[in-house]
Image (cartoon, rainbow, N blue to C red):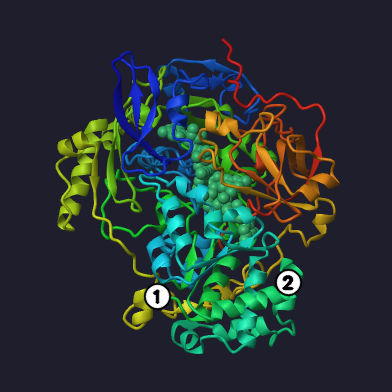
Amino acid sequence: MNTRFVQTASHWGVYDVETDAHGGILGARPFDADPHPAAYMQGLPEMVRGPLRIDRPYVRAGYLRDGPGPGKRGGEPFVPVDWDHALSLVADELRRVRARFGNEAIYGGSYGWASAGRLHHGPSVLKRFLGLHGGYVDKRGNHSFGAALGIMPYVLGRADITNLAASWPEVIASGRLVVMFGGAAPKNAQIDAGGAVVHDAPDWVRRAGDADLRFVNIGPSRADLPPGLRAEWIPLRPNTDVAMMLGLAHTLVEDGACDRDFLARYCEGYDRFEAYLTGRDSGIARNAEWAAGITGVPAQRIRALARDMAGGRTLINTSWSVQRADHGEQPVWMTVTLAAMLGQIGLPGGGFSLGFGAVNGITAPRVENMPRPTLALGTNPVKTYVPVGRVADMLLHPGSRIDCFGARITLPEIRLVYSIGGNPFHHNCNLNRFLRAWQRPDTVIVHEPWWNPASRHADIVLPATTTMERNDILAHENSPYWIAMRQVIEPVGQARNDFDILADLAGRLGFGQAYTEGRDEMGWLRHMYAAARDRALEAGFAPPDFDTFWEAGRYAFPQPQTAPPLLHDFRADPERHPLRTPSGRIELYSQTIAAYGYDDCPPHPSWLEPAEWLGSDTARRFPLHLLSNQPATRLHSQLDPAAASRASKIAGREPIALHPRDAAARGIRDGDVVRVFNDRGGFLAGAVLADHLLPGVVQIATGAWYDPAQGGEPGALDKHGNPNLVTLDTGTSCLAQGSIAQTALVEVERHGEAPPVTAFDAPAIIG
Ligand SMILES: Nc1nc2c(c(=O)[nH]1)N[C@H]1C(S)=C(S)[C@@H](COP(=O)(O)OP(=O)(O)OC[C@H]3O[C@@H](n4cnc5c(=O)[nH]c(N)nc54)[C@H](O)[C@@H]3O)O[C@H]1N2
Ligand SMILES: Nc1nc2c(c(=O)[nH]1)N[C@H]1C(S)=C(S)[C@@H](COP(=O)(O)OP(=O)(O)OC[C@H]3O[C@@H](n4cnc5c(=O)[nH]c(N)nc54)[C@H](O)[C@@H]3O)O[C@H]1N2
Ligand SMILES: [Mo]
C-alpha cells in the first residue's frame, strides 16, 4: 500500500505521522534522534478524527435564545450554526461589550498550554487580536511556579524561573550529594511547553546511577525519584518542607558549619534570619526537634543529613510542586537560604536548583543566543491584570481589592471571557466555586478542537484545528532545534486555525490588515523564519534559507556539552556582576517585603502553617492529604480520551493511590471505586493500593476530564476523578497569589453503586 510520512511535533515530541493513499491515519513513528519517545506519542493521531472532534461552530441553546447574560454554562445542549452566523455573534458581542463597558470588561488572560508551534499558539494569537481591538484584562503569573515567580525578584532579582535548574552534565561531573525536595519524577521530562525534541532523561538517570553520586528524596512519595538513582527516601508530611529546611539550617548553626564568609560577602540580611532560626527573637529555636514535630522526620535523621550536606559538595533542588502550596514563596526562599548557608552557590554541583526535571529541556545545557521565530503579540492598551489563580474572585467579586506582586489591584468587572488553548476546568482549583463564577459573565467564547470541559462550558464554541491540520515551526530555548511542523491532513470537519478565525473576526471589526499584515500561514512562517535566521547568522550560526529548512525538516544548533553553574559569575565577582536586588546581593531578609507588611509573607523565609495540612484541626474531619501531581500518561487534560490515558484508568476512573494502611482502615480494596471529598466538593476515582506513599497521603494525577453528575450544577459530584473539585482556590500569599493545588485535606470512602463515566460523550446537540 502507498503510505507517506509527514513530520509534525507536539509538546511531547516530534514524530512522523503515517497516512495511506486516502489520507487515512495509520499511526506515528518517533523522531530519529529521539531515544525515548513519550509514552503517549500516538495520542493525537489517534484522537484527531475521533468522535469528540467538534465538527462545526455551536452555540449554547440558552444563549442563542436569550442572548448575552449570566447562564447555565455546562448544563445545556448546543445548537449548530454556520461560520458566518457564529462569527457575527462574536463580532457583535465584542462591539457591544466594548461600546457599553469598555475594553476593561473583556478578559483575554486565557491561560493554557494549547499546542506547540511558534505561529499557531492560541493564547498568543488571541492577545494579538484583542490588543488591536483596544485591549483586554490580562492574567499575571502562571499555575506552574507562580510563588517562585513572585518571590525570586526580591531574593535574586530575577524571575526567569526556568533558568534556575542545574543541568544533568553539571550534576554528574561535579555532584556528590543531591538533596531533592519533591524529587524529580522522570515522567515530567516527557514534555516541554513549546515542544520536546529529544527525550534523554532515562540516559542521564542511568549515567547518574553509575556515577559516584548520592540522591536523597525528601517528600511524601518514594516514587518521585526513579529506582535507578538508588535514592534514600526521607518521608515528609506534605507542605512541611520549610520546617525540614529550617531544622537542617539550625543544625548547621549548632555545628558551626555555616559558611560565614559566603553569607557576609554575597548575602543581605542573614542576621535577621538567624535570629528567627535560633529563636533569639522569639524564644522558639527552629532546631531538629522542632522540625521533627512538624515534618514527621526524626530529629537524628535531620541532624545526620545536615552533617552530610556540610561535609562536601551538595546541591539542593526543590521541585515546583513544593511551591504550588499555601505560602509557596517560603520553600523557594528557604531553599536559597539553606544553600547560601552551605556557601556553595555558584560552584558546580553545589548551591540550589529549582524544578530540576520538571520539564524536558530544563536540565540540558542551553545554546546561548539561540533566536526563535516569533509572532509579535503587539501591545495591550489596557493595563489591568489579575493573578492567574484569582479568576473566580474576579468574576464573583468585581470591585474588590487584592494585594499581589507588591501592588494593590481592583478586580475588574468582566462581561466577556475569551479563552483559547486552555482548559479552565483543569487548571483552576475549587471547581464548584469556579463554575459559579464562570456562569456570571455575559458571554464566554472558546475555541477548541474537542468536546471537552472547556468547550462544554462555553456559549459560543468555535472548532479549532490541531497541529496535524496546519503548518508551523517548533523552536524552544531549551532544545537546540528548529523543527518544521508540516500539515498532515486537511482540517477535520469545518475546523479552522485559531489564527484564521481571528483574522476573519479582525476583518469584520475593521482591523484585518493590522492583524494579518497581509500574510497567510506560509507567509508568516517565512517571515518569522527569516527574521530569526538573520539574528542566528549574526550570532554565528548557519541556518539555511526557509525552503531548504522546510525541505530538510530541521536545523540543529550546536549544543554545548556543559552549562556553567547558576550564579557562577556573581560568585566570581559580585561587584562586577551584582544581582538586580536592592543590595545587589542575595536577599535573605527583604526590606521591600518588610515594608509591605504582609502577615502571610514575612520579610525572611519562615515556617507558616498551611491552611490545611496533616497537623491542622481540619485533619480531624478530613484526615488525608491529597496531592494531585502531573500525569504520566498525558499532558494535563490533553489526550485524556486517548488509549494511553484510558489504559491507566480503574473502572474507567482516574486512579488514586492510597497507602494500604489507610485503605484497610476504610475497608477499601485495590480496584474499588471510591469517593474523595471535603467541604468544597467530591469526585469518584479508582483505588490503587501503593506503599510508596507516606501513610496519610493520597495521590491522584490531574487531568481527568471533569464529568459532573449534573452538568452546570455547582456542587455536583464529579464521576471521573478531577482533583480540583476539592482543592483550595486561595492564593499562596498577598505577594504572589500563586495557586495552591497541593494544599488540600480530604476523606476517602468506598462508593457503592457507581454511575457510569460520561466524560467522553459529546454533549446533547439540538436543532
Ligand atoms: N489539581 C491540580 N491542578 C492543576 C495542577 C496541579 O498540579 N494540580 N497543575 C497546574 C498547572 S502547573 C498547569 S500548567 C495547568 C495546565 O492547565 P491547561 O494548560 O489549561 O491544561 P491543558 O489540558 O493543557 O489545556 C489545553 C487546552 O487547549 C486545547 N488545545 C490544544 N491545542 C489547541 C489549539 O491549537 N487551539 C485551541 N483552540 N485549543 C487547543 C486542548 O484541547 C486543551 O483543552 O493546570 C494546573 N492545574
Ligand atoms: N507527563 C507530563 N509531564 C508534565 C506535565 C504533564 O501534564 N504531563 N505537566 C508539566 C507542567 S505544566 C509542570 S508545571 C510540571 C510540574 O512539575 P512538578 O510540580 O515538579 O510535578 P508534580 O508531578 O506536580 O509534582 C512532583 C511531586 O511533588 C511531590 N510533592 C507534592 N507536594 C509536595 C510537598 O509539599 N513536599 C514535597 N517534598 N513534595 C511534594 C509529589 O509527590 C509529586 O509527585 O510538570 C510538567 N510535566
Ligand atoms: Mo504547569
Amino acid under disc 2: Pro
Near mark 2 (Cα within 10 A), the count class, few <14, some 14-19 or many ≥20, is some
Q: Is residue 394 visible?
A: no
Secondary structure category for the residue under label 2: loop
359 or 117: nearer the eye?
Answer: 359
679 or 266: nearer the eye?
Answer: 266
Amino acid under disc 1: Leu
Decide: is 323 above or below 246: above
Near mark 1 (Cα within 10 A), the count class, few <14, some 14-19 or many ≥20, is many
| Residue 559 occupies quadrant | bottom left
Decide: is 422 above or below 593: above
Give the labeled residue for mark 1.
Answer: 579
Callout 1–callout 2 Cβ contact below 8 Å: no
Q: Residue at x 85, y 41 (%)?
A: 667
Q: How many marks?
A: 2
In the rendered image, which quarter contains the C terminus? top right
Q: CA distance from mark 1 to mark 2?
A: 37 Å
Which circle's residue, 1 or 2, is located before the other in the chain?
A: 2
Q: Is residue 468 visible?
A: yes
Q: Residue at x 18, y 44 (%)?
A: 530
Give the labeled residue for mark 2.
Answer: 298
Q: Position of residue 286 (x, y in %)?
A: 70, 79
Q: Position of residue 664 (x, y in %)?
A: 83, 45
Q: Position of residue 473 (x, y in %)?
A: 29, 39
Left or right, residue 539 beside residue 82: left
Secondary structure category for the residue under label 1: loop
**Which callout, 1 or 2, points to the residue nearer the camera?**
2
Q: Residue at x 34, y 65 (%)?
A: 563
In the image, farthest residue toward the front: 210
Q: Position of residue 453 (x, y in %)?
A: 58, 31
Would the CB of label 2 be found within 8 Å of ligand 2? Answer: no
731 or 656: nearer the eye?
Answer: 656
